[in-house]
Amino acid sequence: MGRSQREPRPPGAATNQQPPPPAGSGRDAAEHDTIVNQTPASPTNSSDWLLPFRGTASPRGAAAAAAALRRLRWGRGGGGGAGPGARGYSQDAEGSWFRSLFVHKVDPRKDAHSNLLSKRETSSLYKIQFHNVKPECLDAYNGLTEKVLPKLHLDPDYPCDLVGNWNTWYGEQDQAVHLWRFSGGYPALSDCMNKLKQNQEYLEFRRERSRMLLSRRNQLLLEFSFWNEPLPRQGPNIYELRTYKLKPGTMIEWGNNWARAIKYRQENQEAVGGFFSQIGELYVVHHLWAYRDLQSREETRNAAWRKTGWDENVYYTVPLVRTMESRIMIPMKISPLQ
């Protein structure tokens, strides 16, 4: 016998009905957008614009969120339209959407992160080099490097400066790391490279050096605006280069958090410099730290955890990282950072 009306679906039965979009219309939709995309007031200092932007819930905003949630549960209609049968998705979906209103968010920007995060008052470009040396050639490599590189550093015709030179102690073995600064950005880099092509002593240095190397790689870097500028310092010190490979699209959020957290790592003058890659492997961050010795490193890092706010920085930045690496490095004789 045919049925004139469709039989109600039993609880839990599958349905083709698609869940309605979370935002309402009119005033409720505007209030929803205000909750999610609200940005802070005008900054009070040069670093405030870097702070994280979070959704905030005012009493009025909370009422709008509750109204939107009711629409999700009972359909898009107003006061008495659809009943419970119109509901097309689970409690978990509702909870997930409701929680998303208050999730840590970053304000979308219309500019490259290199412009937002780097120092604007300077136009310095940095180059970091990693040279993997044949184990039997390390002493000869160091001697050759210490003979030639200071000449470039001291020659005013070359717009480049040595920032630091190290051998890796713990981490990748038989490795040399060099950090250069080019004052004037990309034009200074091009000028320096063109002059080196005509420098016969340097060309001979490269030929001799090539026989000592297993591999080499480099990156061009910019300096984070909120980090210390890496200036020469007296030793003896050991240096730690911590390298973070971030998930693409997360550099702004990384900078937002570290702009606030760097103050927790300044008491012992351990913060040397912070950089992010521009050419080479991208979304790579390098933090350079100085310590008297490994015991001092341990004590300084443990002290940071006793400061309110450091744990929050770690909580928000760890999910942004794909891989991370730590090198402990010993300065070479020619390094301005001793």
Image (tube, rainbow, N blue to C red):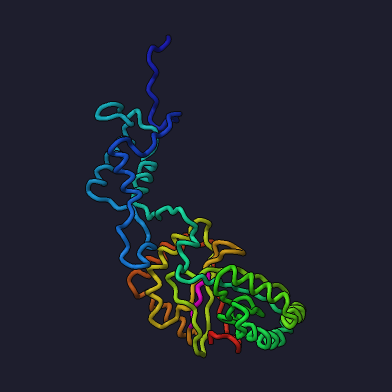
Residue 199 horizontal side relative to residue 163, left or right? right
Residue 28 pos. (x, y %): 29, 39
Vertical relation: 242 (above or below) 38: below
Q: Residue 288: x, y in percent? A: 51, 76
Q: Does residue 300 belong to the magenta stretch? A: no
Residue 43 appears anywhere in the view: yes
Percent of width and height locating residue 2: 42, 10
Q: Which residue does the image show at 72% across and 87% down from the upper left?
A: 140
Can residue 167 be seen in the rendering of this structure?
A: no
Residue 260 lies in what quarter of the image?
bottom left
* Of residues 297 and 266, the one drawn nearer to the viewer in this rendering: 266
Left or right position of 80 against 334: left
Toward the viewer: 177 or 200? Answer: 200
- Name of the residue lying farthest toward the front: 157
Residue drawn at the location 42% of the way across and 52% of the way down? 108
Q: Quadrant of the N terminus?
A: top left
What are the residue bounds of the magenta stretch? 285-290
Residue pictured at 45% horizontal, 29% vertical? 16
Which secondary structure class fits the magenta region best?
strand
Q: Is residue 292 above or below residue 203?
A: below
Q: Relative to 153, does residue 81 appear above or below in the rendering? A: above
**Image quadrant assignment for residue 30:** top left
Q: Residue at 32% of width from left, 63% of height from top?
A: 43
Between residues 123 and 175, which one lies in front from this camera angle? 123
Residue 173, image x, y percentages: 65, 78
Farthest residue to the left: give it.
59
